[in-house]
Image (cartoon, rainbow, N blue to C red):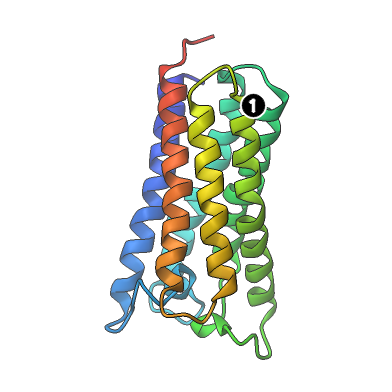
Amino acid sequence: MKNIVLFRIAIIGVTLFVVASILGGFQFEDYSIFSMLISESMAIDTPYGWILRYFFYVPSGILIVLFSLVSIAKLPSSRLITIGLTGFAIFYGLGTIIVGFFPCDAGCNKDFIDPSVSQVIHNISGLLTYTLAPVFILLTGFGFKGKSSFSNRSILTAILSIVFIVVMFSSPDSGYVGLVQRIIETLFISWIIGLAYLVKRTVEN
């Protein structure tokens, strides 16, 4: 696959995610990006949640998986890069696909009272994504050590995302949990875009 095609796949993938996360809030008059999670805008009872899930989030996850895995062959040979991008493809890309197919209950059932199977799967997938995605970004960063300045960006992204994830998990009922989640997602998306540009500039094999 041509590098420019791979670059476009990454950009389209993150664009779908960003557009969905913005459009989702317009379904409600009182939706707050500060206190409400992204998942609440695509919950099972939302008016247009199914459109957001199947036409935005699921395709976004598919494209991110494809980009992450194919990029391995375009980047410097490194076991850590291979492990890092494979893990990111699974726990962020595939995780995005899973939460698209298994939305949370109305209001995302934050008290976890009599949750549906879909809610349980959604929560487990989200937990694994936020727990492990930064770890694989960090491994990718270590893999770039001595090969690219992208190493420092990856390590910084991993550290910052871990800090904000700890904040989010420690205060799930706060009035700023939605904002913190969006900061985390911005860190992940910015990292993907940075990697996409790195692949684009890489000499074709």
* Residue at the bottom extreme, as displayed: 113
Seen at 66% across and 36% down, the residue is 139
Q: Quadrant of residue 73?
A: top right
Q: Quadrant of residue 18?
A: bottom left
Q: Is residue 77 above or below residue 38?
A: above
Looking at the rendered image, the quarter that the C terminus falls into is top right
Which residue is disc 1 drawn over? 143
Seen at 27% across and 83% down, the residue is 29
Seen at 57% across and 84% down, the residue is 109
Q: Is residue 137 above or below residue 61?
A: above
Pick the residue in front: 133 or 38. 133
Where disc 1 sits, the SS reads helix
Q: Is residue 37 left or right of residue 146?
A: left
Image coordinates of residue 11 in percent, x first then y, are: 39, 38
Q: Is residue 109 above or below residue 1?
A: below
Image coordinates of residue 120 in percent, x first then y, are: 69, 75
Image coordinates of residue 152 in percent, x first then y, are: 51, 31
Pick the residue in front: 161 or 129. 161
Crowding around mark 1 (Cα neighbors within 10 Å: few <14, some 14 to 19, many 20+) is many
Q: Type of residue at label 1?
A: Gly
Q: Is residue 128 left or right of residue 54?
A: right
Pick the residue in front: 102 or 32. 32
**Image label count:** 1
Image coordinates of residue 31 in percent, x first then y, are: 33, 79
